[in-house]
Image (tube, rainbow, N blue to C red):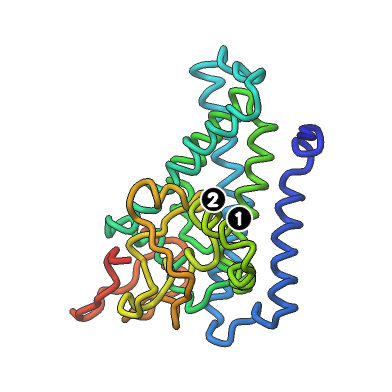
């Protein structure tokens, strides 16, 4: 593992991979989403900018600040740990806790309001990877725990892990169904059977974003995994159909401003007249 390269340029590499998926969607004429509106573009651009420019750096800074104050002797205490063991720690403390955080936000109404923006998009695309309320990431335990592990000396491991994780997440959200082509290759069937039970793929993650559970594919009460789909397999929330929903989004969603999507509970909508909504609560 070239730790010098990863330590100096991990975010540039992630940005390059992200751009690669953007160009791939442009090449396949599926980056510009006809069902998308101006509000969708605002949520995606502002939400992504806040996460990458404010929330993520802030959490890392606060982790360093707090640990310097309360436990400075722990700094770099795990620097000599083998990278395999370090990667295992990130899988458990970042990816697995993100699975549980994601699952919890689909169960608790207050928390679902922080995650709703990610599901209100009527399409799958690389565009929606960072499409979330500002506080969704700020409260995500995995980012804080990653900050702790970085403080303990696992920064080079984290950067390599981050590149792998974000590549899988980008690929799982992409509107280019790369896994479809691999399913059709007879010699790859055993490998794909294993792969789709280990990492998130466009098929399994698209099911999580489906509009209507009655279509036999949509599974918004499961398929919560980010890097590892294995957590869904392990904890009983997996659904694998190798198909994609006919439509995406949130059924019967009332109009919500992009400001409320990004900044709730600081920005709240005027109280609407009473009405029945099947998927405003965390039924997803």
Element class at badge 2: loop
Residues at marks 1 and 2, CA–CA distance in whole angstroms: 6 Å
Disc 1 to disc 2: CB gap under 8 Å:
yes
- Residue drawn at x 35%, y 53% as measured from the top left: 103
Q: Residues within 10 Å of mark 1 (few under 14, many from 20)?
A: some
- Residue 265 drawn at (x, y percent): 36, 59
- Residue drawn at x 59%, y 82% as measured from the top left: 33
Tell me the number on the disc at residue 227: 2
Image quarter of residue 60: top right
**Extreme residue in the top direction:** 73
- Residue 264 drawn at (x, y percent): 39, 61
Element class at badge 1: helix
Q: Relative to 265, does residue 124 appear above or below in the rendering?
A: below
Image quarter of residue 10: top right
Relative to 1, 74 lies left or right: left
- Residue 169 drawn at (x, y percent): 58, 57
Q: Which of 218/10 is in front? A: 218
Q: Is residue 62 visible?
A: no
User: Looking at the rendering, in which quadrant would you find the C terminus?
Assistant: bottom left
Q: Relative to 219, does residue 78 appear above or below in the rendering?
A: above
Q: Which of 154/199 is in front? A: 199
Q: Relative to 268, does residue 111 appear above or below in the rendering?
A: above
Q: Which of 50/14 is in front? A: 14
**Residue picked out by circle 1:** 168
Please report whichever mark, 1 or 2, sits nearer to the chain's N-terminal start. 1
**Extreme residue in the bottom direction:** 34
């Amino acid at each position: 593992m070239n730790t010098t390269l990863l330590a100096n340029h991990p975010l540039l590499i992630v940005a390059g991979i992200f751009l690669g998926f953007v160009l791939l969607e442009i090449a396949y004429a599926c980056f510009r989403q006809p069902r998308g509106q101006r509000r969708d573009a605002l949520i995606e651009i502002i939400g992504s900018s806040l996460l990458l420019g404010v929330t993520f750096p802030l959490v890392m800074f606060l982790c360093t600040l707090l640990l310097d104050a309360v436990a400075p002797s722990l700094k770099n205490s795990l620097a000599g740990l083998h990278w395999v063991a370090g990667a295992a720690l990130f899988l458990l403390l970042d990816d697995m806790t993100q699975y549980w955080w994601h699952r919890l936000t689909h169960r608790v109404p207050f928390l679902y309001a922080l995650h709703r923006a990610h599901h209100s998009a009527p399409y799958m695309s690389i565009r929606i990877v960072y499409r979330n309320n500002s506080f969704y990431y700020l409260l995500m335990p995995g980012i804080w725990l990653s900050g702790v592990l970085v403080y303990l000396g696992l920064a080079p491991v984290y950067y390599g892990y981050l590149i792998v994780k974000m590549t899988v997440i980008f690929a799982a959200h992409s509107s280019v169904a790369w896994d479809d082509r691999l399913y059709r290759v007879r010699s790859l069937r055993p490998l794909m059977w294993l792969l789709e039970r280990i990492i998130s793929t466009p098929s399994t993650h698209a099911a999580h974003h489906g509009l209507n559970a009655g279509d036999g594919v949509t599974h918004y009460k499961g398929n919560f995994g980010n890097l590892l789909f294995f957590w869904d397999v392990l904890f009983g929330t997996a659904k694998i159909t190798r198909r994609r929903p006919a439509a995406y989004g949130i059924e019967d969603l009332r109009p919500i401003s992009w400001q409320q999507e990004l900044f709730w509970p600081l920005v709240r909508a005027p109280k609407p007249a009473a009405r029945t909504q099947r998927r405003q609560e965390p039924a997803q």
